[in-house]
């Protein structure tokens, strides 16, 4: 297959063996299906042009202060909570849900309301470099389908979950009876799959053990198994929540055991937070191939806890980063990366033995780690031949930009400065499966 676009310049990405690999003066070709056709040293450009049938004059040359990196993967974000992001951070989790979250989420029976917020969250996350997002919507099937449609329209890779909850909401109008929840979940999955969107798929979404009866959890475990679907939920975010789950499921050994017993812990499961998981629980995650989404902004903003990332990595549990909007106040994955490093440094202050997360490791979590956590690493997460070209073109010298660069600062410094100081102004272009999705086309 001939290539449609070829770039030449600096590439920065992660591999299984290296948290950060910087390839200087490389050429990367993207084929007509949006897949990476080749990655080779720049000096081979002439022979590549013959093999792949492109003109060397058509090669897009990146500037010295530019680089390509993989698009970022937000492994946990509530699209429906975007309207109040940056506010309402004064209560702990369970009060926060009942006071702010459930009343807002109940508004999504109104599709005009949903369209407005969902369009804005899609644009905001794409502009900030999120090429893949794993979304919670609300209990409303039609609005959740609309989120899938808007993600497809804008070209973001997405897992979309219609939220399931049948008990313990103090807002009586924001939950569904078991039968309705099951039927609507099946309708959601059927209708979303029927659309055959290239990059948008359904994810089975029990809100968390507190909001779901054992019957509902069993039902959802079966639905996920029968349809080979992704699963997402929350786990061990906050101490009160962990206590409550113990009371609600007295026959289960741990919070992890609740999901395990209901067939919800698979190699396509991603659980948000996990701050209070024991080593035994992490072992179960590893055995099952289930993943954790680390949501450090949310963990700090709702004063929930701190995930020990080093311990999770030592247990070889798949791990990605999540913004957890609006428990986390920022929709930017760069913020999630920074807060992950901050949290790790706090843990190092508390324990001199703690091995602090490096910026290279945080970079991997935001990209390849996220794709592994969502079991999408066969398609995205880094620059590997055969994967989709999900990428950011970063430019660190833009007029009025947030970062000053100085002579002699090489590609590693340029990347580190982008991760710590950059923002959406530096993200000149965003690609998903080879399609340019930022700047936005006129829809
Ligand atoms: N646990 C159950 N629901 C939620 C939610 O919407 N946000 C967060 N952060 N935790 C939850
Ligand atoms: Zn969440």
Image (cartoon, helix red, strand yellow):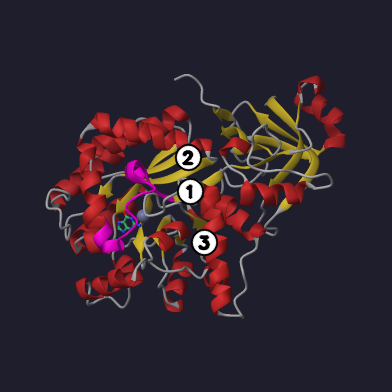
Name the front one of labels 2 and 3.
2
Q: N-terminal of the two: label 1 or label 3?
A: 1
**Relative to 383, is 221 above or below?**
below
Ligand 2's image quarter is bottom left
The residue shown at (17%, 49%) is: 174
Name the front one of labels 2 and 1.
2
The residue shown at (76%, 41%) is: 10
Q: In the image, residue 247 lies at what x, y percent?
A: 21, 75
Q: Front-most of 66 and 88?
A: 88
The residue shown at (41%, 52%) is: 324
Q: Front-most of 111 and 347?
A: 347
Q: Which mark is residue 260?
A: none
Q: Residues within 10 Å of mark 3 (few under 14, many from 20)?
A: many
Secondary structure state at the residue bearing disc 3: strand
**The image quarter in which residue 220 lies:** bottom left
Asked if marks 2 and 3 touch (Cβ < 8 Å), the reply is no
Does the magenta portion include 80? yes
Q: Which residue is mark 1?
A: 74
Give the magenta-colored segment's residue range. Answer: 76-96
Structural distance between the alpha carbons of marks 2 and 1: 9 Å
The residue shown at (23%, 41%) is: 140
Asked if marks 2 and 1 touch (Cβ < 8 Å), the reply is yes
Q: Front-most of 118 and 253?
A: 118
> Left or right: where does residue 144 sit relative to residue 76?
left
Q: N-terminal of the two: label 2 or label 3?
A: 2
């Amino acid at each position: 297959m001939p290539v449609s676009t070829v770039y030449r310049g600096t590439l920065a990405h992660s591999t299984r063996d290296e948290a950060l690999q910087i390839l200087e003066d490389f050429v990367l070709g993207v084929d007509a299906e949006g897949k990476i056709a080749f990655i080779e040293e720049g000096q081979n450009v002439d022979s590549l042009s013959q093999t792949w049938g492109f003109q060397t004059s058509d090669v897009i040359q990146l500037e010295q202060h530019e680089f390509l990196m993989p698009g970022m993967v937000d492994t946990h974000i509530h699209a429906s909570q975007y309207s109040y992001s940056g506010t309402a951070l004064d209560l702990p989790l369970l009060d926060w849900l009942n006071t702010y979250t459930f009343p807002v989420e109940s508004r999504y029976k109104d599709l005009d309301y949903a369209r407005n917020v969902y369009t804005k969250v899609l644009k905001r996350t794409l502009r900030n470099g999120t090429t893949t997002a794993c979304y919670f919507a609300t209990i409303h099937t039609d609005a959740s389908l609309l989120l899938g449609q808007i993600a497809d329209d804008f070209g973001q890779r997405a897992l979309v979950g219609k939220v399931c909850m049948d008990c313990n909401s103090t807002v009586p109008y924001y939950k569904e009876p078991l039968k309705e929840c099951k039927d609507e979940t099946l309708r959601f999955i059927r209708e979303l799959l029927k659309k055959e969107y290239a990059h948008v798929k359904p994810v089975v979404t029990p809100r968390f053990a507190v909001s779901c009866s054992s019957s509902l959890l069993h039902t959802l475990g079966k639905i996920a198994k029968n349809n080979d679907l992704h699963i997402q939920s929350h786990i061990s975010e906050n101490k009160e929540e962990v206590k409550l789950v113990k009371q609600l499921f007295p026959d289960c050994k741990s919070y992890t055991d609740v999901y395990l017993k209901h067939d919800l812990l698979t190699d396509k499961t991603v659980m948000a937070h996990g701050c209070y998981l024991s080593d035994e629980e992490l072992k179960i995650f590893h055995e099952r191939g289930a993943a954790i989404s680390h949501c450090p902004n949310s963990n700090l903003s709702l004063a929930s806890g701190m995930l020990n990332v080093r311990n999770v990595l030592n247990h070889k549990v798949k791990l990605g980063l999540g913004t957890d909007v609006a428990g986390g106040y920022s929709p930017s994955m760069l913020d999630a990366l920074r807060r992950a490093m901050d949290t790790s440094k706090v843990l190092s202050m508390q324990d001199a033995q703690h091995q602090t997360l490096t910026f290279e490791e945080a970079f991997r979590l935001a990209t390849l780690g996220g794709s592994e956590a969502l079991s999408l690493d066969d398609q995205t997460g880094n620059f590997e031949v055969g994967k989709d070209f999900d990428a950011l073109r970063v430019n660190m010298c833009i007029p009025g930009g947030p970062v000053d660069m100085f002579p002699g600062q090489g590609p590693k410094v340029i990347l580190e400065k982008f991760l710590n100081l950059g923002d959406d102004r530096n993200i000149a272009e965003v690609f998903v499966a080879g399609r340019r999705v930022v700047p936005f086309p006129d829809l």
